[in-house]
Image: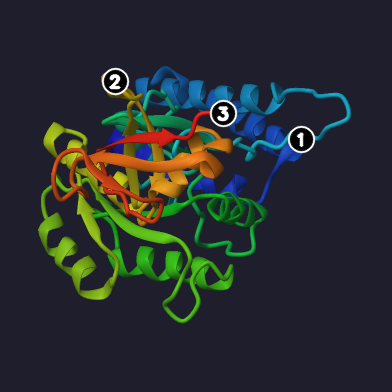
């Protein structure tokens, strides 16, 4: 048996041993596993040295939970920030954390064993003056559907604007898809095929041999948009960033003061379908009462500098100048 095969089966057994444990019970089990590695003298092998470091890191992570007076530490609480929020939703070990590191400013720990990510992490995806918060939560363990962490993952998803279903093209597609859809349906995030959330499938590891057929399977069974990506190909990651932003259906509206150049660095980010009234409120609440007219340059204008009223619908990258009555 090769060293690779040994560590593969050993990691599988580790996952089985710790799958229902939390807190002190989890620490005790991890310490027993570490002792077992030393007793079997497996620590002399390079792959098991890495496994030992990962196990010790897990113990340190559990012990170092912040202590807050008057509050209970919640490893899944991520305050919202940026112009939108997207949750990565998938089974354990499908490449969510690797993807997170590739498209945001974070450095989430990745590993080859199940459930490397044990708490929620957030990073920022920056794209054309937009800042999108991406939340990476622990992967589901599909042999235990009532596991507490599964419910916490769903709780994070409910606070997001969109949910990305991450599916590994090198694994069983139907198993992954059916389980994720069941989680969405059981938690009422998806009801009779309808939802208030945007769903997109990110198909990872598309550069591996034999994944073309699995991609066709995803296309056949899913009504959601599918984005195939490989972290080895920069173009696919750029396409992903653009697609994620498009799913949030936002428009960037730039403003200018009368007689001055437009501020093209700090746009107002609004929902698609927003009007001059919405951006006027954003600038200053008193401007609505004092509003005379606005001028618009950009995609929504019939001509540059078109004079419009409060009900004029704005498009992405429009520039708006608000004219108000003097006090």
The numbered mark, 2 or 3, whose residue comes first in the sequence reads: 2
Q: CA distance from mark 1 to mark 2?
A: 66 Å
Q: Secondary structure at mark 2?
A: loop
Q: Residue at x 50, y 46 (%)?
A: 13
x then y, percent, for residue 240: 23, 43
Q: Is residue 62 left or right of residue 201?
A: right
Residue to which mark 1 is pinned: 24
Question: Quick one: label 1 or label 3, which is nearer the N terminus?
Answer: 1
Q: In terms of depth relative to the viewer, which is nearer, 139 or 19?
A: 139
Q: Which residue is mark 2?
A: 259
Q: Looking at this rendering, what residue extends furthest in the bottom direction?
A: 192
Q: Between residue 118 and residue 47, name the one nearer to us.
A: 118
Q: Mark 2 or mark 3: which is in front?
A: 3
Residue 222: percent from the left, percent from the top?
28, 71
Per the image, the residue denoted by label 3 is 327
Q: Is residue 100 left or right of residue 291?
A: left
Distance from Cα at disc 1 to Cα at disc 3? 66 Å
Count of numbered circles in the view:
3
Q: In the figure, is residue 32 to the left or right of 173?
A: right
- Badge 1: how crowded within 10 Å, few (<14), some, or many (20+)? few
Colour scheme of the picture: rainbow
CA gap, disc 2 and disc 3: 19 Å
Q: Earlier in the sequence, mark 1 or mark 2?
A: 1
**Closer to us: mark 1 or mark 2?**
2
Q: Quadrant of residue 224?
A: bottom left
């Amino acid at each position: 048996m090769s060293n690779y095969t040994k560590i593969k089966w050993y990691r599988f057994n580790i996952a089985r041993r710790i799958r229902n444990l939390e807190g002190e019970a989890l620490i005790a089990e991890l310490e027993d596993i570490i002792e077992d590695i030393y007793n079997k003298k497996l620590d002399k092998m390079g792959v098991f040295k890495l496994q030992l470091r990962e196990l010790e890191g897990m113990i340190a992570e559990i012990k170092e939970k912040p202590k807050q007076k008057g509050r209970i530490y919640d490893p899944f609480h991520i305050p919202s920030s940026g112009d939108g929020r997207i949750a990565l939703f998938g089974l354990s070990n499908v490449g969510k954390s690797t993807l997170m590191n590739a498209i945001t400013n974070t450095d989430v720990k990745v590993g080859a064993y199940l459930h490397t990510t044990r708490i929620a992490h957030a990073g920022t995806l920056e794209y054309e003056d937009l800042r999108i918060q991406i939340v990476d939560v622990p992967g589901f363990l599909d042999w235990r559907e009532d596991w507490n962490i599964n419910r916490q993952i769903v709780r994070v998803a409910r606070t997001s604007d969109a949910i990305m279903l991450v599916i590994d093209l090198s694994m069983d597609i139907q198993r992954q898809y059916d389980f994720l859809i069941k989680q969405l349906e059981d938690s009422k995030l998806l009801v009779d095929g309808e939802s208030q959330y945007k769903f997109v499938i990110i198909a990872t590891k598309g550069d591996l041999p034999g994944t073309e057929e699995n991609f066709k399977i995803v296309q056949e069974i899913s009504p959601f948009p599918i984005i195939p990506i490989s972290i080895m190909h920069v173009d696919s990651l750029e396409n992903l960033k653009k697609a994620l932003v498009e799913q949030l259906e936002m428009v960037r509206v730039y403003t200018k003061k009368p007689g001055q150049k437009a501020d093209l660095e700090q746009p107002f980010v609004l929902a698609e379908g927003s009007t001059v009234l919405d951006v006027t409120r954003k600038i200053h609440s008193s401007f609505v009462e004092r509003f005379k007219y606005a001028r618009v340059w950009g995609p929504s204008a019939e001509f540059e500098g078109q004079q419009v009223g409060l009900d004029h619908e704005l498009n992405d990258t429009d520039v708006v100048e608000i004219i108000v009555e003097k006090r």
